[in-house]
Image: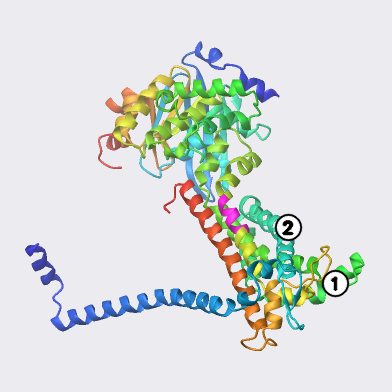
């Protein structure tokens, strides 16, 4: 009942007014796959209505890091996590916190578009159904709203009951974004959302991210440094499981403090 | 092109007779595999031809419909009666019963293996299930005859333990590992990304399983069920041992029955070659073949649809 009422209400209203607010705070994060340490002593703040980019070479722990925010790491057996992650000041890693609730509040878009093998409408209504919403008119309204926000509505409005797998890669990825938006999250995590997309689709997703920034706190993991420079306000550079440098994007790209960051940005390695 | 040839020439200077050797070898392999590939086709065609050739004479004496829907199977009486309806009914009876056992058991254990079991448990259980699938059917028959039949007879106060019910149970247990193994494969083919996407919007494990994983693996699971079913309907040894063998129309699950396969196996030895009885048994085999053939075609069609649905290459 509690979660239902939470999700029904329009959360943006209460978030928008407070800009430059710490939305997620990661404190002293250490993370292990088995005995191998994947993340070392990471402290990082994600601000509301800002895009935070996480860059770094493959295998540096970027994806691992953002998967902690919505507790997706719990799906992988044999992992250990120490440290705290706060969402609006609330510790989300606590044993009494329902991960499903956290995942509703922190949506995620994956590297490869992963629509369900269902039709377009069902793909978006799914998140509402699993959260116990049965009112058909409400669901329909929310589906349309989400598709519009994800800039997909005009392309699919005449074929909502076609299989989602018939869409192009870029459309599928925007569908996945719409699927996230439907449950009204507060934060959006993008895990290399354009890795499998062509440049035109990539541009559309980037424009969308800039648009969505108005309503959400956004974290984007990317391989592509130009992309980080184009869309983000803050950038964190990861290397071998450590956060080497975290600052405003401009500073990271124009005047990095750390030599390693500079080497990576200028393409000397990675 | 010329340059390329010249280059190849200088990297791999082969004597001309070696070139020939390679060519001969290649041709040899090609022929060998072509023959092997066609062998199975030839066997299939041969079997079908023999089946039809030996089965058709009976239909000159008995009309096909009378043969299939005739209520009495008295092949050795004078005059003989060739109605295989009791046999078909027995096969259906036993197979449906077996399905009722093997589908919940097989699919349930597949779900357990895939969704709940830890890696260690799965590493032990999955091979065990596959070993279970490789036990010869006569061993299951023994088990049914010696253990299950007396047990059920005492438990349910039956006049005879060897009946359709016992056969169903034994066949069901036998088909369970097949169903489980194939269904488990189908479940593990469901991409991890579907589960992640489901969890990421706040679904719990049960919702993910019921609304995403099972529908995505649905056609694979139905293939498993159909293949298990066709194994049950084609099974001979077990039903010969535990079904009771009475070629009359069964009135309940606890009547002894004689499925089509066990009629063929039991009577082929005593039917004089070329007699009407002999041809009738071939006709039963033909009908059985058509039934399992249809099952397999359906299974194949479903699994193809499923591959397309998941976006895997056909």
Q: Secondary structure at mark 2?
A: helix
Residue A257 visible from this viewpoint: no
Q: Quadrant of residue B82?
A: bottom right
Percent of width and height locating residue A189 = 47, 30
Query: Looking at the magenta stretch, what is its main secondary structure?
Result: helix
Q: Is residue B222 magenta?
A: yes
Which of A69 and B301 lies nearest the eye of the viewer? Answer: B301
| Mark before the other along the chain sequence, 2 or 1 | 2
Q: Residues within 10 Å of mark 2 (few under 14, many from 20)?
A: some
State the mark number for residue A92: none
Q: Is residue A107 magenta?
A: no
Percent of width and height locating residue B151 = 86, 70
Percent of width and height locating residue B131 = 63, 70
Q: Chain of mark 2?
A: B
Q: Quadrant of residue B245?
A: bottom right
Q: Secondary structure at mark 1?
A: loop
Percent of width and height locating residue A2 = 69, 23
Residue placed under numbered mark 1 in the picture: B161
Q: Residue at x 69, y 72 (%)?
A: B260
Residue at the top extreme of this rendering:
A17
Whether residue B113 sits left or right of residue A20 in the image: it is right
Residue A15 visible from this viewpoint: yes
State the mark number for residue B100: 2
Whether residue A232 sits left or right of residue A79 in the image: it is left
Above/below status of A232 relative to B204: above
Above/below status of B225 relative to A83: below
Q: Residues within 10 Å of mark 1 (few under 14, many from 20)?
A: many
Q: Residue at x 60, y 54 (%)?
A: B222
Magenta extent = B219-225
């Amino acid at each position: 009942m509690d979660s239902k009422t939470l999700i029904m209400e329009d959360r943006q209203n209460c978030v928008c007014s407070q800009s430059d607010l710490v939305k997620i705070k990661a404190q002293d994060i250490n993370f292990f796959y088995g005995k191998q340490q994947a993340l070392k002593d990471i402290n990082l703040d994600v601000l509301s209505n800002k895009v935070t980019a996480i860059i770094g070479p493959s295998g540096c722990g970027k994806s691992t890091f953002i998967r902690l925010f919505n507790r997706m790491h719990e799906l992988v057996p044999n992992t250990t996590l120490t440290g705290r992650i706060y969402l609006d000041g609330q510790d989300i890693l606590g044993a009494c916190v329902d991960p499903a609730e956290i995942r509703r509040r922190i949506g995620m878009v994956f590297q490869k578009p992963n629509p369900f093998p269902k039709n377009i409408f069902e793909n978006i209504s799914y998140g509402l159904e699993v959260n116990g919403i049965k009112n058909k008119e409400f669901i329909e309204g929310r589906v349309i709203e989400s598709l519009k926000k994800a800039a997909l509505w005009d392309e699919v409005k005449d074929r909502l009951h076609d299989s989602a797998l018939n869409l192009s890669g870029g459309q599928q990825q925007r569908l996945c974004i719409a699927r996230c938006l439907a449950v009204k999250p507060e934060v959006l995590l993008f895990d290399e959302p354009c890795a499998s997309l062509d440049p035109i689709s990539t541009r559309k997703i980037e424009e969308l991210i800039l648009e969505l920034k108005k309503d959400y706190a956004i974290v984007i993991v990317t391989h592509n440094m130009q992309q980080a420079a184009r869309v983000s306000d803050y950038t964190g550079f990861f290397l071998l499981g450590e956060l080497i440098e975290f600052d405003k994007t401009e500073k990271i790209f124009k005047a990095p403090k750390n030599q390693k960051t500079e080497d990576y940005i200028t393409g000397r390695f990675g | 092109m010329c340059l390329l040839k010249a280059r190849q020439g200088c990297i791999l200077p082969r004597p001309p007779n070696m070139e020939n050797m390679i060519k001969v070898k290649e041709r040899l392999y090609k022929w060998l595999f072509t023959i092997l590939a066609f062998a199975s086709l030839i066997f299939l065609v041969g079997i079908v031809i023999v089946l039809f050739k030996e089965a058709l004479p009976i239909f000159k004496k008995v009309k096909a419909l009378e043969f299939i829907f005739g209520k009495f199977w008295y092949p050795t009486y004078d005059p003989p009666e060739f109605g295989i309806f009791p046999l078909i009914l027995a096969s259906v009876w036993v197979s449906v019963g077996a399905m009722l056992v093997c589908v919940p058991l097989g699919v349930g254990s597949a779900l357990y293996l895939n969704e709940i079991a830890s890696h260690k448990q799965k590493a032990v259980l999955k091979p065990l299930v596959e070993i279970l699938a490789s036990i010869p059917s006569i061993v299951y028959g023994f088990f049914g005859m010696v253990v299950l039949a007396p047990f059920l007879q005492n438990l349910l106060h039956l006049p005879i333990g060897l009946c359709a019910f016992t056969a169903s149970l034994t066949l069901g247990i036998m088909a369970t590992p097949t169903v489980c193994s194939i269904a488990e494969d189908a479940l593990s083919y469901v991409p991890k990304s579907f589960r992640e996407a489901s969890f990421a919007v706040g679904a719990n494990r049960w919702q993910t399983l019921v609304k995403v994983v099972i529908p995505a693996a649905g056609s694979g699971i139905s293939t498993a069920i159909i293949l298990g079913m066709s194994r049950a309907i084609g099974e001979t040894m077990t039903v010969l041992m535990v079904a009771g063998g009475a070629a009359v129309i069964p009135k309940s699950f606890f009547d002894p029955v004689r499925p089509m396969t066990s009629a063929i196996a039991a009577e082929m030895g005593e039917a004089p070659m070329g007699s009407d009885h002999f041809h009738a048994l071939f006709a039963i085999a033909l009908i059985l073949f058509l039934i399992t053939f249809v099952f397999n075609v359906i299974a194949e069609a479903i699994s193809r649809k499923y591959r397309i649905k998941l976006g895997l290459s056909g």
